[in-house]
């Protein structure tokens, strides 16, 4: 009797974690928190109208706290520093004509005039980098990336999808409290808070559910209004879920159209397939067809392809210049070439 030993192929593929940090979100949280702390400690000095961007002691304190927070998040999630990417807004133009969304929804540009963006678009960030933050990133081998006249949100979405496509076994962690990113949630993409942990109770399980939650409810910070439904059609669709007893805000109820309550919105999301079909196919259901506008400005998949390609190429060029770890995308075990689409939002194909 003879025995034949058949060699088994090892199909195990390594997977890595990438950490993408919405830096301006981290900055805003620390700026507001420390500003409040300084005002409580020394109210006579830090009065209303105080020039915070001229106080290097205050700015340096922000830098120290941010550096500690970033290192803590990386340590908690055990991420290789070379796969840590910090992304910032890069708003260079004094006008808002460059914003591609303003051609769809003109009020989008109003958010840049809000107090929320004051420290993100002012001198605070540039002084932070000059006071040592830039050297800290370089020393720790983090990647700092931005793109001219683009918000960090869009850049993060584009780079996240590009990483997932180029590295099919890897996972991405995004550090932010911004609900815009919840639409990116998938088995390979997780949104985590500033403590480095996910908060599943803050969002729905799938990216599509979270996207439509914002489409229906609107995004106040982005000047995007919630949808107004024709009342009789809404009542017919919701049936017993329609809330007869609630007092709807006068601005949200003109007798013909009204916004949904939070529980009604939840019902629509939990029955999303039917809800989307109903919204898309029912004439005059949504006032001014606002659902079409909201989807175009909120859905990252609506970013024009020319920007996706340009930002993707710019990022990987910078990344490869820092550390040439990009592989040939070839599986040596089965000689399968992974076909990389020019659009990082496209479905990955294998041939």
Image: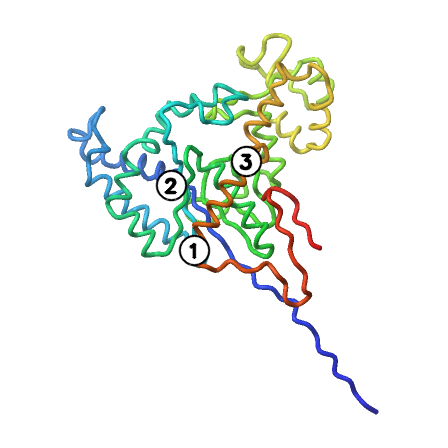
Q: Earlier in the sequence, mark 2 or mark 1?
A: 2
| Crowding near the residue tagged with mark 2, few <14, some 14–19, many ≥20 C-alpha atoms within 10 Å | some
Give the image location of residue 245, x and y in percent: 62, 16
Q: CA distance from mark 3 to mark 2?
A: 29 Å
Which residue is at 61% across, 27% downward?
Answer: 263
Label 1 – label 3 distance at C-alpha: 36 Å
Closer to viewer: mark 3 or mark 2: 3
Of residues 67 and 102, the one drawn nearer to the viewer in this rendering: 102
Q: Secondary structure at mark 2?
A: helix
Label count reads: 3
**Residue 76, numbered circle:** 1
Residue at 69 percent across and 65 percent down: it is 334
Mark 2–mark 1 distance (CA, rounded to whole Å): 17 Å
Given residues 47 and 51, the one toward you in this image is 51
Residue 99's x, y, as percent?
A: 47, 27
* Residue 316 vertical placement versus 228 (above, below): below
- Classify residue 210 by image quadrant: top right
Frontmost residue, 78 versus 171: 171
Residue 323 image position (x, y, % from top left): 43, 58
Secondary structure beneath label 3? helix
Relative to 68, is 205 on the left or the right?
Answer: right
Find residue 285 and report its image quarter: top right
Instruction: Name the residue beneath numbered marker 3.
Output: 306
Q: Which numbered disc flags the more N-terminal residue, 1 or 3?
A: 1
Categorize mark 3 by other alpha carbons within 10 Å: few (<14), some (14-19), many (20+).
few
Mark found first going from the N terminus, 3 or 2? 2
* Residue at image location 62% in from the left, 14% down from the top: 287
Q: Decide: few, some or many residues near mark 1? Use Cα within 10 Å; few <14, some 14-19, many ≥20.
A: few
Q: Is residue 66 above or below residue 322?
A: above
Instruction: Determine which of the numbered discs, if any, sits on residue 26 in the image.
Output: 2
Quadrant the N terminus occupies: bottom right
């Amino acid at each position: 009797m003879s025995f034949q030993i058949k060699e088994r192929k090892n199909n195990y593929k390594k997977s890595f974690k990438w950490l993408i940090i919405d830096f301006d979100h981290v900055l805003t949280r620390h700026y507001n928190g420390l500003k409040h702390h300084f005002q409580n400690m020394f109210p006579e000095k830090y009065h209303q109208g105080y020039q915070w961007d001229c106080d290097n002691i205050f700015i340096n304190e922000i830098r120290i706290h941010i550096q500690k927070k970033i290192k803590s998040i990386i340590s908690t999630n055990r991420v290789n520093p070379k796969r840590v990417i910090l992304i910032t807004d890069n708003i260079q133009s004094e006008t808002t004509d460059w914003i591609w969304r303003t051609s769809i929804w003109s009020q989008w540009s109003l958010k840049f005039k809000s107090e929320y963006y004051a420290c993100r678009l002012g001198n605070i960030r540039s002084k932070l980098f000059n006071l040592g933050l830039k050297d800290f990133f370089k020393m720790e081998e983090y990647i700092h990336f931005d793109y001219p006249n683009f918000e960090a949100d869009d850049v993060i979405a584009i780079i996240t999808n590009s990483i997932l496509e180029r590295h099919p076994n890897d996972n991405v962690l995004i550090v932010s409290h911004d609900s815009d990113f919840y639409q990116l949630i998938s088995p390979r993409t997780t949104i985590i808070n500033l403590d480095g942990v996910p908060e599943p109770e803050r969002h729905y399980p799938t990216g599509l559910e979270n996207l439509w939650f914002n489409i229906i409810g609107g995004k106040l910070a982005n000047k995007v209004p919630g949808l107004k439904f024709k009342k009789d059609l809404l009542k017919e669709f919701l049936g017993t879920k329609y809330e007869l007893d609630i007092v709807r805000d006068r601005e949200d109820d003109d007798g013909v159209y009204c916004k949904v309550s939070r529980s009604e919105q939840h019902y629509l999301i939990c029955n999303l397939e039917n809800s989307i079909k109903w919204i898309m196919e029912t004439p005059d259901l949504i006032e001014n067809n606002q659902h079409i506008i909201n989807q175009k400005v909120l859905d990252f998949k609506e970013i024009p392809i020319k920007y996706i390609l340009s930002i993707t190429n710019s990022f990987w060029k910078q990344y490869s210049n820092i550390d040439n770890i990009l592989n040939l995308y070839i599986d040596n075990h089965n000689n399968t070439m992974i076909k990389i689409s020019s659009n990082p939002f496209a479905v990955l194909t294998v041939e």
